[in-house]
Amino acid sequence: MAWLFPFAVLVGAILVLMGLGLPVAFAFFVTNVIGLYLFFGGSIGVTQMVANFSDAVSTYALAPLPMFLVMGSLFFRSGLGEKVIYALDLCIGNLRGRLAYVVLAAGTIFSALSGSSLANTGMMGSLMVPEMLKRGYKPHMAYGPVLGAGSLAVIIPPSSLAVLLGSLAQIDVGALLIAGALPGLLLVVMYATLILAQTKIDPDAAPHYPVPAVRAAEKVRAVAVNIIPMSVIVFMVVGTIILGIATPTESAGLGCAAVVALLLAYRRFSWSVVWKSLDDAMKVTGMTFLIISASTTFSQIFAFSGASSGFIQFIVGYDFGPYSMLFLMVLVILLLGMFMDQVSMMLITLPIFLPIAQQFGYDPVWFGLILLLAYEVGFTTPPFGLLLFIMIGVAPKGTSLKTVAMSAAPYIALALLLILLIVVFPRIALFLPNLI
């Protein structure tokens, strides 16, 4: 059990430091320094950590990340997102719970245009929740669809989290991005079925109200002007990867170019929007690269100290089957998701999970997508799910965490059901990547 001491020191230090409120990157750096002095030769190890920085952030697979962030920020800051919601609102008929369907449809489109769950939830929550509550929607019918639709950006390409996971786990980023498309659409159908069931069971949850009749020609014009042009961005990002025309990095560049072209076409281009979008992307990218630099050294210490191999042998010694082991890993992520953000979970779990996945012979893309879905659930699990706090921020004053969390519960259950379906039917995840 010699591996237990370095394992306890490294993992324990990370959890304690983040529990004390230290930012993720600095918690990893402090833990790295402790580990380097204990297991890696002291000051020589610190020199090695500094040398790792350039190698960690110069990985080609990370190149799409800042461009996807710029693309999403340009889309939201320019107001193009509001035009999409307007068109969807015109097109969806006089259905009970129609605003919930508008949120779900808009969230799906935004996920394919921004790759950011936080941005999607913030925008739809601020625009749609007040209107839904004013129309008499019960809280779970107002908050739930926004939380469910907002989290779709984790798996529907272009997912920034998928790029980060693929880079850290050395999984083909293009294949991982594409793998999320079909499960993401399946999850949308499951969410729509849930909304339908909720309105059937409790019609008062989404009161029916008269909607002015809209001519078919006006609907067609709204779609043609406000939605179809957005499909150009989706094709530039997703279609070019599927067709083998572009790598993920090239597709990210094409996506940015497509957004700028749309801004010019809609006369919404301004250097102020561009500057703010670059500033948004720079902040997120800078912190992400800092975290990646720290996590690279953490993984090296974890392996060099014997903690990684010892833990694997310990797990294998219990003779867990591949599915039992997968269940335990997903359970660990769900528990961690109650207390920390997705990037933190990823950096803590990947050095432990990846060698185990290799030991059991999991398909890397299939395994990576299951991890992404588990991280997605963590966005909405109390008490510290990030999307829950965003929703509380846009909800009426006095809205409790319990109310928001209970609204998210059915959507969490469906995401877990999707994980089970992907485990039982791997082709759901691997069909599109196998076409590349």
Image (cartoon, grey):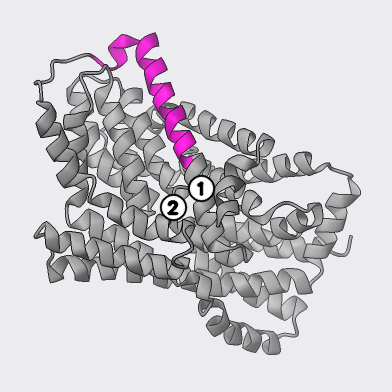
Front-most of residues 144 and 262 = 262
Q: What residue do we see at 27% from left, 60% from top? A: 73
- The quadrant of the image that shows the C terminus is bottom right
Which element is circle 1 on? loop
From where the camera sits, is residue 155 visible? yes
| Horizontal side, residue 16 vs residue 158: left or right | right
Q: Measured from the top left, where is residue 350 in percent x and y? A: 65, 59
Q: How many callouts does the rendering have? A: 2
Q: Kindly report the distance in space between the C-alpha atoms of the residues bearing marks 1 and 2.
A: 6 Å
Disc 1 residue type (three-letter): Gly
176 and 51: which is toward the camera: 176
Magenta segment: 184-207
Q: Is residue 189 magenta?
A: yes
Three-letter code for the amino acid on which mark 2 is drawn: Pro
Instruction: Give the structural element (helix, strand or loop) at label 2.
Output: loop
Q: Relative to 213, does residue 355 appear above or below in the rendering?
A: below
Q: Are marks 1 and 2 in contact (CB under 8 Å)?
A: yes
Residue pointed to by mark 2: 157
Give the number of the disc on residue 180: 1
Image position, residue 246 (x, y; %): 44, 67
